[in-house]
Image: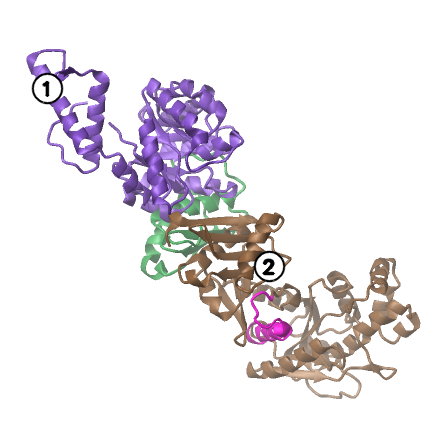
């Protein structure tokens, strides 16, 4: 099960940051070719990320590239180059309709064939940054089997709404919830938006807790220092871990009995509970907690 | 420097908000935002302005750092971005005039010093090979206009000069000629008699009433009969005061003197040796303070570099030294009779031509010294 | 591929390299390397440059590298960008053949 608690945002034209990004051990790295790269440097940034992905070792970290939109002059070439370089996922910004996903998938399919990549190996992510996109989130999330996550880009979204961001996030509350619902209905992940004030650790923690409470699987981060904070908040409590282990034990016991019914503490346990238990153990393991049980997803 | 907390912005002086932010940052360091700046790069750390650098044509200006954040590489980052922006505009050769304390930032970015003006200012250029390329071209151009063996054929002799052999292989004169007068003619003629070959540089910067191409042409026409004289544009290594920024000088009142010293030093230490120039000739200056200053600096600095500095007395007409400003004065007053003793026929022909009408009107209307 | 104008790519920031490519009249390649690493890694840098130029079929140009500690992949990337900016002949890039 792939965890995406943290997605570290790396400006694609910054050589130092690109080459060092793996040090911080986020779950995913998002190399950006879009907003952080000036128009004149799009070509250079594309080549930098292409060469980095081909040559450098990022270990287990998921390599994601945010390409430019396909209705401009850069997006298509971005996709071709990144698939050729072996990217794990293409993140499409400003996704508003199902067709946006359909279009990018066409280019990905073409690229996988041309560059000899296993068909289907390139995943997709969609960033939704407008009201229209949020209202279409349900369909977008179902638009492709390659789509593994949807995210919200709050800055552009609140601009679209004709408002500004507040610390409490009242103005993006509904969008966040809708996004999570759409993700769950499609069986994919939901990623929360970035928190720009790097020095405000308390504010950041509060926002991460809120996101987790809303059901988000993770958060985009713009500074490595944000990574351990997110990981800590997503670490299951001791109680949760113990309960999860008991659930797994109950599954094993039910299998040995040959029974289809799993019960824990006298209560029946159904599929969502089992899945949550598995997720918790995965999160626990990722946080460095030793899990002695063998976990089968 | 933590790259994740560093933000680089490009500010445009045409945007009021941007302009204010750029100016405020400089103001806090007692510096000014000059009018010809096209863009300012502002580096921020944790959203606090840390360093800035600006671009004006192919000159880098407005380099400033918050003293509390010095030594972190922010200034270098700002300059580096300016270089990138300039390259995007097709400008690959940049210069910077700055205080000596900033020199190290630029050296680390590949700049090399062209000249220094005492302890007040240094001039650096972004490509160390550019000067050499220019010098080779200039030398080739000079040789084409006046081949090295010309002196054998026709070294002009002033009446009374007799059989005095040329004192110098290659001599030089630097003039503005706004416009070319009999005074200039006399200076060049006398200088040419003292050299096997004479190189006359005509200043390019267009702050004069007469456009640069006209000024050059009039000098060429007025000296066409002098076989050992080549007249060329001053080129990028004779520094016009027009492009010299003063933002970083503590005492603005000294800017002319500092600029002049830089220009003369660059001439003596780099231009002259590269072109094989042995002497520089100038006319005595009774009126203009800036020219007087230049002459005294030339006499001070050139000998230290093994070059001769020769000051020749100005020619007079009706008891007054002939100068370009007296020509412009005569034009302003419409005194065509008076002009006849001030300029040669070639210049007069131009002044009477339709081409000169707009220029003369502007002179008559304006009250500027130039 | 012919180099027809001067172009640059990259930056002078740490771990990067600023590469300027210029046309060269004679049919040869000149490489100027500046920066602290020139002495220690000059050979290696030249090899990467030569390989990249060969990949683009460039036989005549002048390359100036101002190195700030760039990895080989960065040098390749910046040089590729500069070359493509310095030519009029750039067709679509064949990503599969780019080293």
Residue located 47% across and 61% down the image: B65
Badge 2 marks a residue whose secondary structure is loop
For the magenta stretch, what is the residue range?
B246-270
Q: Is residue C61 visible?
A: yes
Q: Is residue A68 above or below residue A22?
A: above
Q: Is residue B11 above or below residue B187?
A: above
Name the disc covering residue B33, or none: 2
A32 to the left or right of A246: right
Residue C30 at x, y percent in the picture:
44, 55
- According to the image, label 1 marks what residue? A252
Q: Which quadrant does the N terminus of chain A fall into? A: top left
The structure's colour scheme is by chain
Residue B185 at x, y percent in the picture:
78, 75
Residue located 33% across and 46% down the image: A19
- What is chain A's hue in the picture? purple
- What is chain C's hue in the picture? green
Q: Tell which residue pokes out farthest to the left in this image.
A: A257
**In this orientation, which residue lies closer to the viewer: B352 or A251?**
A251
**Does mark 1 fall on the same chain as mark 2?**
no
Q: Tell which residue pokes out farthest to the right in this image.
A: B337
Residue A52, magenta (yes or no): no
Alpha-carbon span between mark 2 and mark 1:
74 Å
Q: Which quadrant does the C terminus of chain A fall into? A: top left
Q: Is residue A23 above or below residue B133?
A: above
Residue A169 at x, y percent in the picture:
42, 33
Number of residues whose C-alpha sits closer than 10 Å to that of mark 1, classed few (under 14), some (14–19) or many (20 or more): some
For the residues bearing labels 2 and 1, Cβ distance under 8 angstroms: no
Residue B267, magenta (yes or no): yes
Q: Residue A79 is drawn in which quadrant?
A: top left
Name the chain letter of the residue that bears numbered label 1. Answer: A
Q: Is residue A122 visible?
A: no
């Amino acid at each position: 099960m792939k965890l995406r608690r943290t997605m570290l945002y790396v400006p694609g034209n910054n050589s130092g940051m690109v080459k060092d990004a793996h040090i911080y051990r986020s779950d995913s790295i998002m190399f950006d070719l879009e907003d952080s790269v000036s128009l004149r440097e799009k070509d250079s940034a594309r080549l930098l990320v292409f060469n980095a992905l081909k040559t450098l070792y990022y270990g287990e970290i998921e390599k994601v590239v945010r390409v430019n939109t396909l209705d401009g002059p850069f997006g298509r070439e971005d996709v071709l180059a990144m698939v050729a370089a072996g990217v794990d996922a293409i993140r499409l910004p400003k996704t508003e309709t199902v067709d946006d996903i359909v279009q990018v998938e066409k280019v990905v399919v073409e690229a996988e064939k041309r560059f000899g990549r296993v068909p289907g190996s390139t995943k997709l992510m969609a960033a939704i940054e407008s009201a229209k996109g949020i209202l279409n989130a349900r369909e977008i999330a179902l638009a492709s089997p390659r789509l593994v996550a949807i995210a919200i880009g709050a800055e552009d979204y609140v601009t679209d709404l004709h408002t500004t961001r507040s610390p409490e996030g009242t103005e993006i509350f509904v969008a966040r919830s809708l996004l999570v619902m759409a993700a769950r209905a499609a069986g994919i992940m939901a990623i929360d938006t970035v928190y720009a004030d790097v020095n405000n650790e308390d504010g950041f923690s509060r926002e991460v807790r809120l996101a987790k409470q809303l059901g988000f699987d993770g958060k985009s981060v713009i500074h490595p220092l944000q990574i351990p904070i997110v990981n800590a908040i997503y670490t299951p409590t001791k109680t949760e871990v113990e309960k999860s282990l008991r659930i797994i034990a109950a599954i094993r016991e039910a299998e040995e009995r040959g029974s289809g019914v799993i019960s824990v503490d006298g209560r029946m346990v159904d599929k969502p509970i089992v899945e949550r238990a598995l997720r918790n153990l995965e999160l626990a393991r990722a946080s460095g907690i030793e899990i002695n049980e063998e976990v089968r997803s | 420097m933590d790259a994740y907390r560093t933000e680089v912005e490009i500010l445009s002086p045409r945007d009021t908000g941007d302009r204010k932010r750029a100016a405020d940052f400089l103001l806090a360091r007692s510096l000014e935002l000059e009018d010809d700046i096209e863009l300012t790069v502002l580096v921020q750390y944790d959203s606090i302005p840390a360093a800035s650098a600006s671009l004006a044509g192919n000159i880098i200006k407005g380099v400033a750092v918050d003293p509390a954040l010095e030594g972190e590489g922010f200034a270098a980052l700002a300059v580096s971005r300016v270089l990138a922006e300039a390259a995007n505009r097709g400008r690959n050769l940049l210069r910077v005039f700055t205080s000596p304390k900033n020199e190290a930032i630029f050296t680390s970015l590949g700049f090399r010093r062209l000249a220094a003006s005492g302890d007040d200012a240094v001039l650096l250029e972004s490509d160390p090979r550019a000067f050499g390329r220019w010098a080779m071209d200039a030398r080739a151009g000079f040789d084409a206009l006046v081949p090295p063996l010309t002196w054998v054929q026709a070294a002009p002799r002033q009446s009374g000069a007799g059989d005095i052999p040329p004192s110098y292989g290659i001599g030089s004169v630097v003039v503005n000629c706004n416009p070319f007068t009999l005074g200039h003619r006399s200076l060049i003629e006398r200088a040419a008699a003292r050299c096997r070959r004479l190189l006359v540089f005509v200043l390019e910067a267009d702050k004069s009433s007469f456009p640069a191409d006209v000024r050059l042409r009039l000098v060429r026409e007025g000296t066409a009969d002098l076989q050992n004289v080549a007249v060329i544009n001053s080129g990028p290594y004779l520094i016009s005061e027009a492009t010299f920024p003063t933002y970083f000088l503590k005492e603005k009142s000294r800017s002319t003197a500092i600029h002049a010293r830089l220009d003369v030093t660059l001439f003596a230490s780099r231009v002259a040796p590269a072109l094989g120039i042995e002497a520089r000739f100038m006319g005595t200056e009774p009126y203009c303070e800036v020219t007087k200053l230049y002459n005294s600096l030339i006499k001070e600095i050139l000998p230290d570099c093994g070059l001769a500095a020769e000051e020749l007395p100005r020619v007079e007409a009706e008891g007054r030294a002939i100068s370009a400003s007296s020509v412009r004065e005569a034009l302003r007053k419409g005194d065509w009779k008076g002009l006849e003793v001030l300029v040669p026929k070639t210049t007069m022909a131009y002044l009477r031509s339709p081409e000169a009408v707009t220029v003369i009107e502007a002179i008559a209307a304006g009250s500027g010294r130039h | 591929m012919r180099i027809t104008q001067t172009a640059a790519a990259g930056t002078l920031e740490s771990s990067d390299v600023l590469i300027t490519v210029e046309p060269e009249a004679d049919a040869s390649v000149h490489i100027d390397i500046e920066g602290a690493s020139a002495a220690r890694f000059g050979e290696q840098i030249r090899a990467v440059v030569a390989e990249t130029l060969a990949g683009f079929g460039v036989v005549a140009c002048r390359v100036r590298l101002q190195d700030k500690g760039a990895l080989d992949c960065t040098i390749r990337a910046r040089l590729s960008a500069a070359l493509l900016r310095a030519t009029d002949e750039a067709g679509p890039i064949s990503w599969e053949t780019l080293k």
